[in-house]
Image (tube, rainbow, N blue to C red):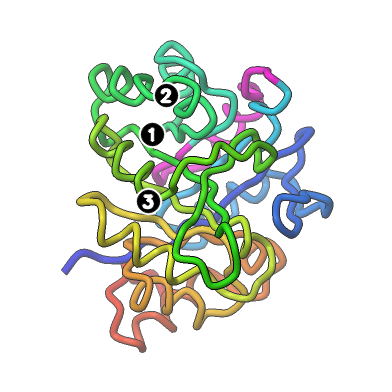
Amino acid sequence: MLTRRIIPCLDVKNGRNVRGVRFSADRDAGDPVELAAYYNQSGADELVFYDITASAEHRDIMRGLLEQVADQVFIPLTVGGGIRNPDDMFQMLRAGADKVSLNTATVENPEIIREGANRFGSQCIVHSIDAQRVAEGSDRWEVWTHGGRVNTGLDAIAWAVRGVELGAGEIVMNSIDADGTRDGYDLDLLRAVSRSVPVPVVASGGAGTLEHLAEALSEGEAHAVLAASIFHYKDFTVDDAKEYLAEKGIPVRKDF
C-alpha cells in the first residue's frame, strides 16, 4: 500500500513565513530558510513553498529566497506563486524545485497546464485550487484566485477534473473556509475531489490536531496532508503526526 505523505507548507510574504485565518497572513511564523532546514531533518516527506502575494502583486516569485530554501532540503520541494508560463516553470525547477504549483495562471490560461506537462512531465505539475463553499450546507464550491481575492465562479470539482485532463499530476485542494482555523479539513470537499480524479489529492486548510490529519486521509480519502501552523508553532512534530497515523493503521514512511 502506498504511504501517505506529510507535507509542511511555507507561506511566504515579504521574505517571512506567515500564517493567518482564511488567507489573512497576519502572523509571523518564522524564517523560511530555517524552517526548511528543520523540516528536512524532522522527517517531512515533502515541503511546499508558496510566495502567497506574487500573483496578486503581478510579480515574479522571490527566486533568491527560493534558492536558499532549496539549498536546505533533500526532500521533494513544490514551489508556487507568480508562475505564469513554462519558462517560469523552468526557472523554478532550475532553482531547485521538484514540482511547480499552478493556481491563478491556470484560470487565466488553462493551456499552461498542458504546456508544462508536455515540457516537464505531469509529475512536475501541481494543480492547486483555492475553493470556498458557496453557502452553508451546499455541495458546491467555487474557485478563487489571486490569493483568495478573486471569485472566478468556476465549480471547484469540475476545475480539478479539467486540470487533470490537461495533464496535471497532482491536485492540492485548499479550503478557504477552513484555512488557518484549525477546526479540521473540509472532508466533503476532499471526498468529492478524490473520487473525481485519478491522481493524488493533497488536503490543505484547517489542520489543528493530529486527528484532523487522520480524518483527511481516511474520511476525506486524500493521499497526503499539507499543514502549517501545527508544525510551525511546534504544537506537534512530523514524527508525532506519523506515529499517530501509524497507530490508526494509516501507512506512513517511518522515521520515528
Task: For the C terminus, give its image quadrant.
Answer: bottom left
Looking at the image, residue 40 lies above or below residue 149:
below
User: What mark, if any, has residue 157 been given in the picture?
Assistant: 3
At 51% from the left edge and 62% from the top edge, which residue is drawn? Answer: 42
Badge 1 is on which residue?
98
For label 1, the crowd category at 10 Å Cα-Cα, with few meaning under 14, some 14 to 19 and many 20 or more, is some
Disc 1 versus disc 3: distance between alpha carbons?
26 Å
Question: Which of these two is toward me, 185 or 243?
Answer: 185
Could you tell me which secondary element the residue under label 2 belongs to?
helix
User: Which image quadrant is residue 98 in?
Assistant: top left
For label 3, the crowd category at 10 Å Cα-Cα, with few meaning under 14, some 14 to 19 and many 20 or more, is many
User: What mark, if any, has residue 93 been given in the picture?
Assistant: 2
Q: Earlier in the sequence, mark 3 or mark 2?
A: 2
User: Which image quadrant is residue 126 in?
Assistant: top left
User: Which image quadrant is residue 184 in?
Assistant: bottom right
Disc 2 versus disc 1: distance between alpha carbons?
6 Å
Could you tell me which secondary element the residue under label 1 belongs to?
loop
In contact (CB < 8 Å): disc 2 and disc 1: yes
User: What mark, if any, has residue 83 been given in the picture?
Assistant: none
Question: Which of these two is toward me, 66 or 107?
Answer: 107
Residue positioned most to the top = 87
At 25% from the left edge and 51% from the top edge, which residue is drawn? Answer: 197
Question: Which residues are the magenta region?
Answer: 58-78
